[in-house]
Image (spheres, grey):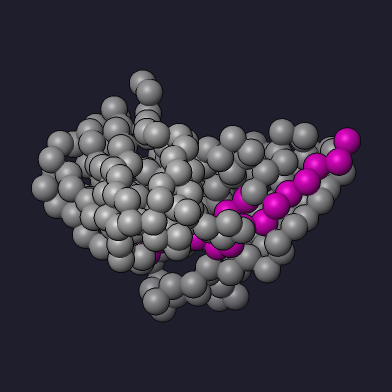
Amino acid sequence: NAGVTQTPKFRILKIGQSMTLQCTQDMNHNYMYWYRQDPGMGLKLIYYSVGAGITDKGEVPNGYNVSRSTTEDFPLRLELAAPSQTSVYFCASSYPTGGYEQYFGPGTRLTVT
Amino acid sequence: AQTVTQSQPEMSVQEAETVTLSCTYDTSESDYYLFWYKQPPSRQMILVIRQEAYKQQNATENRFSVNFQKAAKSFSLKISDSQLGDAAMYFCAGQRRWDNDMRFGAGTRLTVKP
């Protein structure tokens, strides 16, 4: 099992550009999450999904969009990138919530200049 | 609301010694889960240990153990016989039982001295 994979590993965007961060898991988890980690900080939840076709906002959703068409994939879309979106982005997946371990991808380092 | 606080930005320990990392988790809920995650320089988030709030027994995983004091909202991680590979950022996290929002603390950077 590859677990949770993310692409790309690094990306530099110019202000106003858009991009999609890809996330795929092969553990058949229903629950998937997107977090951002700013320098010197813990992770903050952007969006999550409890299954294909079902998504909901987390703590910091502004400036992002998600979709979930399959169990395996959970892409994160950045529209009109801003310097405040410079961060490391982590995707994670888990069994249904209730304290189950979340399995994290390796992260994407995004810089917006 | 839920708040996770890690008051030690940095800690260091001598190899083979014991170190304790502190965390407090504040929530009005009585049913929740607490976690310690390790983030080495590779950035990969790795679960170290998990505690269920309704269990009185403290969780242990080999050299890692927790001291959970529910009334004091305290959830500390003890690392025994520290090894060089334990050097990393350690994040405390909490999640209410029926919630999808896991909250993380700001982290503690642990250095292990040979």
Q: Residue at (15%, 36%) from the top-left corner?
A: A70
For the residue pair B96 and A82, the one nearer the viewer reads as A82
- Regarding residue A81, the answer to whether it shows in the image is yes
Quadrant in the rendering for residue B100? bottom left
Principal secondary structure, stretch drawn in magenta: strand
Measured as percent of width and height from the top left, residue B113 is found at 86, 41
In the picture shown, does residue B91 fall above or below B81? below
Residue interval drawn in magenta: B90-114
Q: Is residue A86 left or right of residue A65?
A: right
The answer to whether residue B55 is seen in the rendering is: no
**Extreme top residue here?**
A1
- Residue A102 position in % (x across, y down): 40, 44
Q: Nearer the viewer, residue B65 or A79?
A: A79
Residue A108 shown in magenta: no
Image position of A51 (left or right of B108): left
Query: Count of labels shown?
Result: 0
Q: Nearer the viewer, residue B109 or B61?
A: B109
Which residue is at a point 42% across and 37% down the rendered structure image?
A105
Question: Which image quarter: residue B58?
Answer: bottom right
Indicate whether A21 appears above or below A40: above
Residue, x 67% and y 43% (percent of image)?
A: B88
Q: Quadrant of the N terminus of chain A?
A: top left
**x%, y% of residue A34?**
35, 50
Residue B99 belongs to the span the image colors magenta: yes
Could you tell whether B24 is left or right of A57 in the image? right
Q: Position of residue B105 (x, y in %)?
A: 55, 62
| Rendered residue at 39%/56% (across/down) | A15
**Left/right of residue A34 with respect to residue B78 in the rendered view:** left
